[in-house]
Image: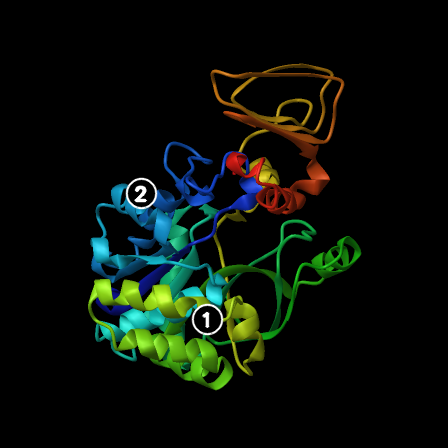
Amino acid sequence: MADRSNTYVVVMAGGRGERFWPQSRQNCPKQLLRLLGNLTLIEQTAARMLAVAEPENCLVITNIDYVGPMRSLLPMLPPDNIIGEPFGRDTGGCLALASGVLESRGVRNDAVVIATPADHSIESIPAFSNTLMQAVTVAARCEAPVLIGVKPEYASTGYGYIRCGNQLDYGDEKTRFFAADGFREKPSAAEAEEMLKEDIWRWNSGIFVWTHGVFKKILSEHAPELAAISRAVGKISDPKSLESFLRVEFERAPNISIDYALLEKLDYLVVAECNFQWADIGSWTALRSQIRADENNNVIRGTFAGLDMENCIVVSDPQHLIAAIDVKDLIIVNQGDVTLVCSEKSAQRVKDLVKKLDKDPTLRKFL
């Protein structure tokens, strides 16, 4: 049985969620939105993780501008456990920083750390907790990182995949474990269709489990620049000193995902096949898995009236009516001073539009 007192959580909550613009803005990123129900994404994530770890063992790494709002939303966590990055450095920088913070607090090398994004939808907390606790036990036993893999439900081109090799003698009938046998980042539609036919590919959920000691070791071996940041942070015990250090030094950290910086370089990884319903809330199309469509396959949230409309996603403030006639395959989102209209197949390009707006001084105010 996993030792809850020696289990730690790192919630990666630093992104701005640009693909959810115009609801996600610079002063209110995706993780602070109530996209699914009455709780924000960060509140839902914290509730899940507190099922497997004590509040004092949970860290949230976020943008420095969001520390205050997150402390207000998560009063059950010690304030110093919500740590702000002055510069976004992807999941590689985030997890190196978190590892250093744990080191500075005297966390043992055999402590098990669960790293999770803050933008997932997971229906069953008991099933999620069971899978994580098994992964915690396996990570401690085999001294290798464990990735939570999701059996594909459709041929997604928006997710990364991990290939499963031999099944390992861990887990139970609900959670199977495999040796990892390679990664594939966001395949083409044709490739995704072929991969779906093979029962060897799992979506990479972005949830990782490892011991503190193993992470330090493999970080030093494969990502020395990140390891240097982690070691420097590990010598800082005062929160104010940490903030000062990050303002000066964190900008120099590589801006790279932990997958590219570390995991894809390893000879041995373990995949835990999840047994819970999972979705990455990455763009507006994710609402299709969360909100029941009407008879014309339209997903509607807010105030709407339409005629002869098919396969659309519509999101509006309750006080703002969106009306449409004879349209299909569109995303229509209204938020205050902005209305977004785009093809559903172009949902990932919302981030590109945000970058374009950021370059125009006259339009930057809408971010």
Residue 125 drawn at (x, y percent): 38, 48
Residue 157 drawn at (x, y percent): 69, 53
Q: Quick one: 184 or 29, which is closer to the camera?
A: 29
In the picture, measured across the screen, residue 117 lies left or right of residue 71, that is right
Relative height, residue 31 to residue 366 (above, below): below
Disc 2 element: helix
Res 127 visible: yes
| Separation (CA) of disc 2 from disc 1 | 27 Å
Relative height, residue 87 to residue 299 (above, below): below
Residue 218 drawn at (x, y percent): 45, 82
Disc 1 element: helix
* Amino acid beneath label 2: Pro
Mark identifier at residue 69? 2
In the picture, measured across the screen, residue 328 lies left or right of residue 102, that is right
Mark identifier at residue 252? 1
Q: Quick one: 272 or 306, which is closer to the camera?
A: 306
* Amino acid beneath label 1: Arg
